[in-house]
Image (cartoon, helix red, strand yellow):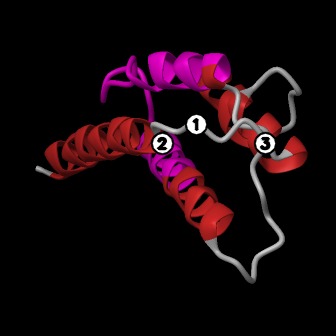
Amino acid sequence: MTNILNKITEAKDENTFLYQLHEESIFDEQLFKEYIEIISLITSENTDRKLIATVIERNVYIVCTAIHHFLPDDLFVIKNFPSNMNEYIEQLRNENSRLLRILIQNER
Protein backbone atom coordinates (compact mmCIF):
# COMPACT_ATOMS: atom_id res chain seq x y z
CA MET A 1 0.00 0.00 0.00
CA THR A 2 2.81 2.41 0.87
CA ASN A 3 4.41 2.10 -2.57
CA ILE A 4 1.13 2.84 -4.33
CA LEU A 5 0.43 5.85 -2.10
CA ASN A 6 3.94 7.20 -2.63
CA LYS A 7 3.47 6.88 -6.37
CA ILE A 8 0.16 8.75 -6.49
CA THR A 9 1.20 11.51 -4.07
CA GLU A 10 4.64 12.36 -5.47
CA ALA A 11 3.36 13.66 -8.83
CA LYS A 12 6.35 12.18 -10.69
CA ASP A 13 4.50 9.55 -12.73
CA GLU A 14 2.65 10.84 -15.80
CA ASN A 15 -0.10 8.31 -15.20
CA THR A 16 -1.20 9.81 -11.89
CA PHE A 17 -3.87 12.38 -11.19
CA LEU A 18 -1.55 14.73 -9.31
CA TYR A 19 1.07 14.70 -12.05
CA GLN A 20 -1.52 15.58 -14.66
CA LEU A 21 -2.99 18.33 -12.49
CA HIS A 22 0.32 19.83 -11.33
CA GLU A 23 2.52 19.40 -14.40
CA GLU A 24 0.02 19.48 -17.26
CA SER A 25 -2.82 21.53 -15.69
CA ILE A 26 -5.28 18.82 -16.68
CA PHE A 27 -8.12 17.52 -14.54
CA ASP A 28 -8.34 13.88 -15.60
CA GLU A 29 -11.60 12.54 -14.20
CA GLN A 30 -10.61 8.88 -14.60
CA LEU A 31 -7.30 9.41 -12.82
CA PHE A 32 -9.13 11.31 -10.07
CA LYS A 33 -11.46 8.34 -9.64
CA GLU A 34 -8.44 6.04 -9.34
CA TYR A 35 -6.83 8.44 -6.85
CA ILE A 36 -9.94 8.42 -4.65
CA GLU A 37 -10.24 4.63 -4.89
CA ILE A 38 -6.66 4.19 -3.72
CA ILE A 39 -6.82 6.65 -0.83
CA SER A 40 -10.13 5.16 0.29
CA LEU A 41 -8.17 1.97 1.07
CA ILE A 42 -6.05 3.74 3.68
CA THR A 43 -6.42 2.38 7.19
CA SER A 44 -4.41 2.84 10.35
CA GLU A 45 -3.19 -0.74 9.91
CA ASN A 46 -1.81 -0.39 6.37
CA THR A 47 -0.52 3.20 6.31
CA ASP A 48 1.80 5.19 8.54
CA ARG A 49 0.82 8.56 10.00
CA LYS A 50 3.28 10.55 7.88
CA LEU A 51 1.84 9.17 4.66
CA ILE A 52 -1.72 9.82 5.84
CA ALA A 53 -0.71 13.44 6.52
CA THR A 54 0.82 13.65 3.04
CA VAL A 55 -2.44 12.47 1.45
CA ILE A 56 -4.38 15.08 3.43
CA GLU A 57 -1.95 17.76 2.21
CA ARG A 58 -2.35 16.61 -1.40
CA ASN A 59 -6.13 16.73 -1.08
CA VAL A 60 -5.91 20.31 0.16
CA TYR A 61 -3.61 21.10 -2.77
CA ILE A 62 -6.22 19.78 -5.21
CA VAL A 63 -8.87 22.03 -3.67
CA CYS A 64 -6.51 25.01 -3.81
CA THR A 65 -5.82 24.45 -7.50
CA ALA A 66 -9.57 24.51 -8.11
CA ILE A 67 -9.77 27.85 -6.31
CA HIS A 68 -6.83 29.23 -8.31
CA HIS A 69 -8.57 28.18 -11.51
CA PHE A 70 -11.25 30.80 -10.76
CA LEU A 71 -8.98 33.66 -9.70
CA PRO A 72 -8.81 36.27 -12.45
CA ASP A 73 -5.27 37.34 -11.49
CA ASP A 74 -3.88 33.80 -11.45
CA LEU A 75 -2.32 32.29 -14.56
CA PHE A 76 -3.23 28.75 -13.48
CA VAL A 77 -6.08 27.43 -15.62
CA ILE A 78 -7.08 23.79 -15.50
CA LYS A 79 -7.92 22.07 -18.76
CA ASN A 80 -10.93 19.72 -18.62
CA PHE A 81 -12.17 21.48 -15.51
CA PRO A 82 -15.35 19.61 -14.53
CA SER A 83 -18.63 21.47 -14.21
CA ASN A 84 -19.41 19.38 -11.13
CA MET A 85 -16.21 20.28 -9.28
CA ASN A 86 -18.18 20.61 -6.06
CA GLU A 87 -18.73 16.82 -6.12
CA TYR A 88 -15.00 16.19 -6.41
CA ILE A 89 -14.26 18.63 -3.61
CA GLU A 90 -16.86 16.89 -1.45
CA GLN A 91 -15.13 13.54 -2.03
CA LEU A 92 -11.82 15.06 -0.98
CA ARG A 93 -13.41 16.63 2.11
CA ASN A 94 -14.95 13.30 3.08
CA GLU A 95 -11.63 11.51 2.68
CA ASN A 96 -9.80 14.17 4.68
CA SER A 97 -12.35 13.85 7.48
CA ARG A 98 -11.95 10.07 7.49
CA LEU A 99 -8.15 10.30 7.44
CA LEU A 100 -8.13 12.85 10.26
CA ARG A 101 -10.27 10.51 12.34
CA ILE A 102 -7.71 7.76 11.75
CA LEU A 103 -4.91 10.07 12.93
CA ILE A 104 -6.88 11.11 16.02
CA GLN A 105 -7.83 7.51 16.80
CA ASN A 106 -4.15 6.53 16.71
CA GLU A 107 -3.32 9.28 19.22
CA ARG A 108 -5.34 7.50 21.93
Describe the element under mark 2 as helix, strand or loop: helix
Residue 42 falls in which quadrant of the image? top left
Which residue lies under the disc numbered 3?
A: 79
- Percent across and percent down for residue 87 are 37, 36
- Looking at this view, is 94 or 69 the one in front? 69
Q: Residue at the location (86% across, 36% down)?
A: 12
Residue 4 falls in which quadrant of the image? top right
* Disc 2 and disc 1 in contact, CB within 8 angstroms: yes
Question: As drawn, which residue projects farthest toward the left?
Answer: 108
Which stretch did the figure color magenta?
A: 30-59
Which residue lies under the disc numbered 2?
A: 85
Mark 2 to mark 3 CA distance (whole Å): 13 Å
Describe the element under mark 1 as helix, strand or loop: loop
- Percent across and percent down for residue 55 are 51, 43
Q: Residue at the location (59% across, 26% down)?
A: 32
Q: Point out which mark residue 82 bears.
A: 1
Specify the amino acid type for callout 1.
Answer: Pro
